[in-house]
Image: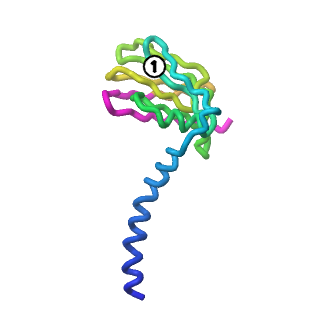
Amino acid sequence: MKRVLSFMLPIAAVAALLFPVMLQAASLEPIDSAGVQVQQQQQNGVTYLAGGIGEDEAKAIQQTSGYNLHMTFSVGAQDEYTADVDVMIEKSSGQTILTLNQTGPLVYVQLPPGKYTVVATRKGETHHDETDVGAGVSRNLVFHWNDAG
């Protein structure tokens, strides 16, 4: 019996280590493109994607590449996606380069390398985040509001 347990322990350890990888791989499942309405947009020369309503649309955005700032908006104890957020991105000089109204729950932006301030407002409650965006690596910002309404 001791031999069986000593054999099973390494298998259980490997399975525990692979579980997060398997979960991530599940998000790469095929997407029903008929239900996806995500289109690349531009404002002031800044390219972005906004949306994520529904599982297929969220997956479509999450599987895109070429965007170096990823923002996610959630609300409540269950971290439910929310799509009623106003977003403003400013350069470190204070120049506003992107303004989106009633957007989300996912916003992916392609920005030139530099320092930016992101302001996300939902129902009058504002969150600020300062981020340094570089070339080749994406920054992930998560904005969460506690209310569920």
Q: Position of residue 149 (x, y in %)?
A: 68, 35
Residue 22 visible within the image: yes
Identify the amino acid type marked 1: Thr
Q: Left of 138 or right of it: where is 77? A: right
| Magenta-tinted stretch | 129-149
| Residue shown at 55% from the left, 34% from the top | 73
Verify whether residue 124 appears in magenta.
no
129 is higher (above) or lower (below) than 1: above
Say whether residue 148 is left or right of residue 72.
right
Residue 59 left/right relative to 94: right
Judge whether residue 148 is colored magenta.
Answer: yes
Image quadrant where one finds the N terminus: bottom left
The kind of secondary structure element at disc 1 is: strand
Out of 3 and 29, give the one closest to the viewer: 29
Toward which corner of the image does residue 115 lie, by quadrant?
top left
Is residue 81 visible in the rendered image? The answer is: no
Q: Residue at x 39, y 65 (%)?
A: 14
Task: Mark 1: give few (<14), some (14-19) or many (20+) Cα within 10 Å.
Answer: some
> Which image quarter: residue 38?
top right
Count the marks.
1
Q: Position of 66 compared to 60: left or right? A: left
Q: Is residue 63 above or below residue 67?
A: below
Render colour scheme: rainbow
Question: Residue sitting at 41 percent across and 83 percent down?
Answer: 4
Q: Residue furthest bottom?
A: 1
Instruction: From the top left corner, tell me how far across and down residue 142 is, in percent.
Output: 48, 36
Q: Nearer the viewer, residue 74 or 19?
A: 19
Q: Which residue is mark 1?
A: 47
Q: Position of residue 112 (x, y in %)?
A: 35, 20
User: Residue 83: x and y, percent?
Assistant: 61, 30
Q: Nearer the viewer, residue 14 or 103?
A: 14
